[in-house]
Image (tube, rainbow, N blue to C red):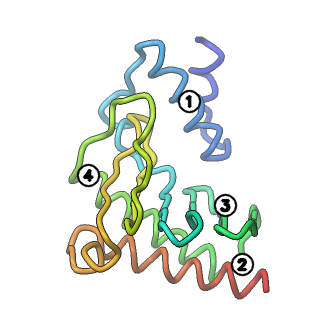
Amino acid sequence: MATWRGIADAPDLESRHTLQAWTFLRATGVVPDVATAKVALGVVVVVAVTGGHDTLAGYRDGSVRYLNHAGGVAVIDSPTPAMAAANAELTTAGQALANLIGPWHEPTLPLVPAGATRLIVLTPSGPHFGQATYEQLDADPMAQPVLNSAVRLLQLVVDQTT
């Protein structure tokens, strides 16, 4: 447990490593302190499409992952300045959302149903998420900034990888 705590507390690690450490720590009953619990270390947007899901993940450290339902994958660890700015906008919007909703405490998230879009904010206290149709999220004042930021980031990812 001390190793996981060391990883969780290390200031310059990749966001995914910090999040993984907190997943293991929570599983052993360790709870992050109030100042750390809701820090948005990443935002994931999952869109159910015919034949699967498109998944975009932007992390506080600037890295991005995009998994296309057709099998394409983009892994970006050194984003362009525009992509870094869009990613920062996404995590800022995610932080605002996490501040308003609580974390999911179950071991796994439920499957994303057909026709749904899910917004997930990844924090040391666990994932904070909401889901609805894309249109419903786009009309929701809490979800819309996250969704709009994700669309901007996705466009930059697609432009860079095509």
Q: Which residue is mark 1?
A: 9
* Residue 10 in view in this figure: yes
Calculate the distance from the C-alpha at mark 4 to the C-alpha at mark 2: 28 Å
Q: Quadrant of the C terminus?
A: bottom right
Q: Which residue is mark 4?
A: 99
Vertical arrangement, residue 91 with respect to residue 105, above or below: below
Indicate which label's residue lies in the foreground, 1 or 3: 3
Q: Which residue is mark 3?
A: 63
Calculate the distance from the C-alpha at mark 4 to the C-alpha at mark 1: 21 Å
The structure residue drawn at horizontal position 59% and vertical position 67%, both measured from the top left corner, is 51
Q: Amino acid at mark 4?
A: Asn
Q: Are marks 1 and 3 in contact (CB under 8 Å)?
A: no
Disc 3 crowd, CA 10 A, few/some/many (<14, 14-19, 20+): many
Q: Is residue 162 left or right of residue 1?
A: right
Q: Which residue is mark 2?
A: 80
Task: Check disc 4 and report its element: helix, strand or loop.
Answer: loop
Q: Amino acid at mark 1?
A: Asp
Q: Quadrant of residue 120?
A: bottom left
Q: Amino acid at mark 2?
A: Thr
